[in-house]
């Protein structure tokens, strides 16, 4: 005789199981539409692999598992994917979640599938993978993926395999009817589980003694298999996993631990049947036995229900009378929750839909003050202190709740059932668990944010320290150079100039900063050691100032035009800036003209007096650094374009690595990283095209154009001078014509923008219309001025 242990506490509520056991299991049929939540199990939701409009067959995978603790979803029948959207799902809060909606076609057409006659020929890994691909989750509790439980570790040997056939919750008879009618499938599933787990000691099926027909059927089917059917007295909640383990083996699972920690694996008999059908016939989990009962149902019944079937469809088949029903419950009266909407679907963990009348399940009376009787503690099967936890929950003292092992509570409701003050104790515990979990998630997010902030701060501090070190090094080098120059022997003016030229050449050879020589000259001038400016140096200086002023004037005019088009309140300030820049430009042009006129007698100087190529290169570098429009040599342009291509390729590689990492981690910013890669790729293509075009031009020029001068630097300077002289010598009429052309171009662009804005109904249309009128007035005035000139 096998010894049976007892558990602490427990209660004996009215069973009311007879209502749904009068008839055998009935096939519920195919409803017009199935709603399949992507999360029908504990762990990560599945991810859809079908699109709206696709036709699917019965048993076809429509959503794949995402992660180790997850399970795929399959089509329960053939039909067309009508939607992938948020729908109301079975949940105590009445929440919505992502679902796949199938419009059934009534054909019930299967996908090609095949099972195994001899599963012992496959390895454990292959068999567990078949269970995983079948989407099987625990069908008697919270829906833990079965493949995860079956993936036992060698360092934790399993002694006992237990199948739970207790079904202690009142009203529910899904497991009882399954034992009565399909005991052979349960035993076959237990054989597969035993082959996978390889328990070193025993395989047990625990059943309460209130199911004599099911017990008899199981014992007959288990003859000669070595599987023991263990019968024990009825008590609620003996069906809890830890409670059943204690009843059958006397072992207690430690707080926060798993059954495998004490050498035990526990599965539900419905799960065992699903595993048998998956291995033997290749059928995924697409249906389950569900009890529809309660006195508000005219025909209480156990149905074989396709997953995704709306609750309303089952109620209609059972003769449901809405007026007699006090509330609909998903599950049993002890641990079930109220359904807010009958459109919710049946899922893998739905074992019962209860529709009681007022007389059958009257509403609880108002809660009264706790009288500290201790009956809740006597009823608790986990040996907790419900009364003390109640006070902590009301005071939101979460740390004390965790110290009192709140998360060991299985939410069986025995404490609430035993409470003479009708306090809904289990509701307080559920709410506190949710609050604690949310606080833990918030803490994790805060820690991650803190780590990112600290990393960024450290990076910025390091970058600033590096910059400061570079600045200090440059300053020390400049001081050393100035000290060396101050200690040098005095020389004639010509020698000083020649020495400066030599230093510039040396600096260019040893440094990438061509403007350093100019900085040194500026320091010398500030110290009063600067040599007199030669005519050639003055010409170059004025030309640089002129180019810089022209560039600043063009930018100021663009800003003014944009401000006027947009009716910007700063338009007057931009106009003042244009006026001042024009005055500075005119002053520089005048000074340059006077200087060039004073040099007119010496323009016929021999070619040997032309500027030194090194000095011209220094001038170009200075002009480029100052923002002037100095000519860029072909060699410099080639180098610049090559550097641009190399830099862009490096940034593209980094962007692609970030995108790959974001896709691997399912980062919410994947789209932003993808856009970054596309933009960087476009920039790289543009840079490569510009470089190729430039190299092709150089090749064509070198093959077809004769060398115009022995000194290319001097030739570039002469071309720049000619362009500036042409601008300076432009007549008033030509300048007005140039203004007219600019206004006509701006009017054309404004008209295009206005037409587009009107077509789109944009609010900017009125602003663009006003700008167009002003531009046309300016054009008319310019044309009038030209006609009078």
Image (cartoon, grey):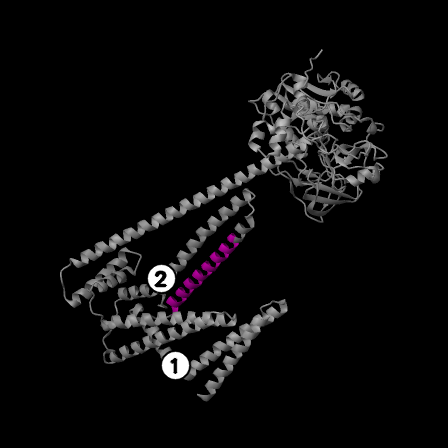
Looking at the image, residue 552 sits to the left or right of residue 474; the answer is right
Q: Is residue 123 visible?
A: no
Element type at mark 2: helix
Percent x, y of residue 634: 36, 64
Which residues fall within the magenta stretch?
Answer: 676-704
Identify which residue, 61 or 756, lies in the foreground: 756
Percent x, y of residue 460: 40, 48
Q: Are marks 1 and 2 in contact (CB under 8 Å)?
A: no
Q: Is residue 234 above or below residue 94?
A: above
Location of residue 487 (image quadrant):
bottom left
Looking at the image, residue 637 sits to the left or right of residue 423; the answer is left
Percent x, y of residue 672: 54, 51
Nearest to N terminus: mark 1 or mark 2: 2
Location of residue 219 (image quadrant):
top right
Looking at the image, residue 56 sits to the left or right of residue 606; the answer is right
Distance, label 1 to label 2, CA atoms, is 32 Å
Q: Which mark is residue 636?
A: 2
Q: Is residue 496 above or below residue 359?
A: below
Q: Which residue is mark 1?
A: 730
**How crowded is the residue under tag 2: few (<14 C-alpha within 10 Å), some, or many (20+)?**
few
Q: Which mark is residue 764?
A: none
Question: Which numbered disc, 1 or 2, marks the residue closer to the eye?
Answer: 1
**Farthest-out residue, bottom:** 788
């Amino acid at each position: 005789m096998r010894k049976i242990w007892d558990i602490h506490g427990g209660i004996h509520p009215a069973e009311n199981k007879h209502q749904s056991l009068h008839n055998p299991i009935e096939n519920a049929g195919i409803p017009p539409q199935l709603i399949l939540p992507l999360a029908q199990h504990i762990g990560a939701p599945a991810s859809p692999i079908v699109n709206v409009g696709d036709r699917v067959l019965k048993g076809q995978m429509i959503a794949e598992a995402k992660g180790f603790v997850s399970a795929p979803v399959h089509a329960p029948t053939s039909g067309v994917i009508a939607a992938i959207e948020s729908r109301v799902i079975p949940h105590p809060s009445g929440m919505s979640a992502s679902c796949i909606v199938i419009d059934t076609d009534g054909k019930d057409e299967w996908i090609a599938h095949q099972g195994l006659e001899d599963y012992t020929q496959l390895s454990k890994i292959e068999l567990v993978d078949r269970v995983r691909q079948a989407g099987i989750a625990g069908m008697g509790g919270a829906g833990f993926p079965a493949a995860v439980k079956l993936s036992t570790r060698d360092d934790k040997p399993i002694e006992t395999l237990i199948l739970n056939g207790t079904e202690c919750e009142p009203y529910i008879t899904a497991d009882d009817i399954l034992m009565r009618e399909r005991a052979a499938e349960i035993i076959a599933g237990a054989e597969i589980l035993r082959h996978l787990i390889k328990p070193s000691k025993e395989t047990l099926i625990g059943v309460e003694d209130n199911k004599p027909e099911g017990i008899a059927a199981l014992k007959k089917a288990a003859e000669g298999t070595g599987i023991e059917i263990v019968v024990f007295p009825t008590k609620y909640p003996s069906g809890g996993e830890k409670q059943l383990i204690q009843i059958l083996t006397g072992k207690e699972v430690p707080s926060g631990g798993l059954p495998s920690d004490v050498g035990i694996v526990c599965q539900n008999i419905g799960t065992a049947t699903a595993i048998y059908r998956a291995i033997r016939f290749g059928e995924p989990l697409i249906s389950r036995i569900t009890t529809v009962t309660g006195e508000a149902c005219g025909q209480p019944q156990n149905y074989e229900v396709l997953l995704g079937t709306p609750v309303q469809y089952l109620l209609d088949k059972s003769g449901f009378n809405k007026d007699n029903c006090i509330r609909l419950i998903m599950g049993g009266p002890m641990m079930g929750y109220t359904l807010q909407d009958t459109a919710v679907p049946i899922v893998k963990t739905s074992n019962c839909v209860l529709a009681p009348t007022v007389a059958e399940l009257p509403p609880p009376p108002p809660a009264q003050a706790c009288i500290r009787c201790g009956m809740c503690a006597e009823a608790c099967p986990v040996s907790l202190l419900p009364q003390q936890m109640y006070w902590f929950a009301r005071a939101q003292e979460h740390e004390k709740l965790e110290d009192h092992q709140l998360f060991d509570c299985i939410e069986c409701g025995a404490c609430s059932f035993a409470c003479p003050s009708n306090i809904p104790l289990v509701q307080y515990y559920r709410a506190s668990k949710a609050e604690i979990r949310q606080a833990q998630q918030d803490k994790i997010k805060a820690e991650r944010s803190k780590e990112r902030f600290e990393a960024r701060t450290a990076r910025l501090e390091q970058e600033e320290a590096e910059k400061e070190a570079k600045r200090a090094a440059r300053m020390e080098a400049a001081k050393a150079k100035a000290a060396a120059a101050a200690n040098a022997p005095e020389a004639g003016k010509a020698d000083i100039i020649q020495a400066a030229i030599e230093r510039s050449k040396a600096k260019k050879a040893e440094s990438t900063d061509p403007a350093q020589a100019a900085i040194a000259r500026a320091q010398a001038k500030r110290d009063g050691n600067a040599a007199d400016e030669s005519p050639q140096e003055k010409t170059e200086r004025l030309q640089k100032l002129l180019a810089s002023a022209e560039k600043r004037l063009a930018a100021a005019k663009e800003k003014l035009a944009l401000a006027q088009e947009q009716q910007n309140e700063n338009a007057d300030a931009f106009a003042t800036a244009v006026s001042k820049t024009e005055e500075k430009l005119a002053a520089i042009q005048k000074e340059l003209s006077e200087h060039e006129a004073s040099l007119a007698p010496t323009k016929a100087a021999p070619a040997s007096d032309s500027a030194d190529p090194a000095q011209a290169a220094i001038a170009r570098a200075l002009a480029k650094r100052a923002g002037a429009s100095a000519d860029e040599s072909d060699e410099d342009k080639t180098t610049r374009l090559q550097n641009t291509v190399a830099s862009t390729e490096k940034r593209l590689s980094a962007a692609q690595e970030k995108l790959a990492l974001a896709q691997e981690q399912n980062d919410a910013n994947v789209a932003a990283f993808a856009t970054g890669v596309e933009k960087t790729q476009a920039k790289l293509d543009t840079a490569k095209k510009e470089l190729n075009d430039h190299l092709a031009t150089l090749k064509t020029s070198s093959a077809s154009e004769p060398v115009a001068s022995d000194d290319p630097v001097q030739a570039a300077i002469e071309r720049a001078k000619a362009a500036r002289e042409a601008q300076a010598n432009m007549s008033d009429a030509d300048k007005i014509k140039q203004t007219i052309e600019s206004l006509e171009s701006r009017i054309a662009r404004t008209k295009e923008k206005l037409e587009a804005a009107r077509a789109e109904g944009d609010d900017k249309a009125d602003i663009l219309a006003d700008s167009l009128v002003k531009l046309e007035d300016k054009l008319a005035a310019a044309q009038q001025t030209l006609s009078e000139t």
